[in-house]
Image (cartoon, rainbow, N blue to C red):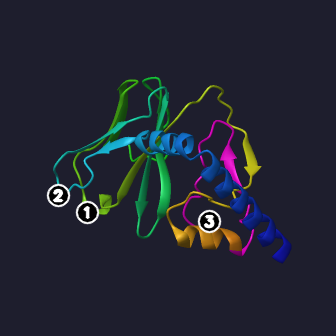
Amino acid sequence: QDNWITCIFGYCQLLFQLCFLFCPQILCLFTELIDAGVTQTPRHKVTEMGQEVTMRCQPILGHNTVFWYRQTMMQGLELLVYLRNKASLDDSGMPKDRFSAEMPDASLATLKIQPSEPRDSAVYLCASGLVTVLQNRLLPVQKPWCFLFSSSTQQLSAAFLAPPPAQEVRRFGVPHVPRQGKNRS
């Protein structure tokens, strides 16, 4: 394990040396990466029970798929729905009696809750992706061991402790989030 850590730190050191050599170009690249991203509104929402709640997601330019996730204190992260080119591809994680999702065009997706209930209190996340091939076969993959440019030192430190367990990911890029009662990675 010490050899593995030495190898990773050597790799990181080489990257930082290259950063100094090509500093202006890399700074521009990082600026582009920081500016590019998904926009989700509103950032915070407090509502009365029974009211309609609408959340909006603007995907990254050129992405054709939007994923809506919900994270609760008790359940953890779960995939609610994903939409591609205006159509819902999988809404099996979404309570259909009160939740609805749509993607009217390539620049906007919405998630609505009507009527809202106390059990809907959660963090709702949206993500976007470029999906070209759809297959439902699950493939085992490894999470990356090192987050070189992570702003979280805890995440970076944790990445060096041990290799992560394998996680199932659908070929088209949708992380398989285990349902309640299964082992989580």
Q: CA distance from mark 1 to mark 3?
A: 25 Å
Whole-percent x, y for residue 149 in the image: 57, 57
Q: Nearer the viewer, residue 47 or 15?
A: 15
Which quadrant of the figure has residue 185? Answer: bottom right
Comparing labels 1 and 3, the label whose residue is closer to the camera: 3
Image: 67 above or below 47: above
CB of mark 1 within 8 Å of CB of mark 3? no
Task: Label 3, secondary structure: give it.
Answer: loop
Badge 3 local density, few (<14 within 10 Å), some, or many (20+)?
Answer: few
Q: Which residue is mark 3?
A: 184
Most foreground residue, 141 or 83: 141
Label 3 amino acid?
Arg
Real-space Cα separation, disc 2 to disc 3, in angstroms: 31 Å
Pick whichever of labels 2 and 3 is earlier in the sequence. Answer: 2
- Give how far across and how far down residue 163 sits, in percent: 75, 67
* Amino acid type assigned to the residue bearing label 1 in the image: Pro
Disc 2 packing (10 Å; few <14; some 14–19; many ≥20) = few
Q: Which residues are magenta?
A: 161-184
Residue 53 in the image: state x and y as whole percent.
22, 46
Q: How dense is the environment of label 1, judged by Cα within 10 Å: few (below 14), some, or many (20 and up)?
A: few
Residue highlighted by disc 2? 49
13 lies left or right of 39: right
**Magenta includes 183?**
yes
The residue lying furthest to the front in this view is 21
Write down the residue under mark 1. 118
Q: Residue at x 31, y 58 (%)?
A: 120
The nearer-to-camera label among 2 and 3 is 3
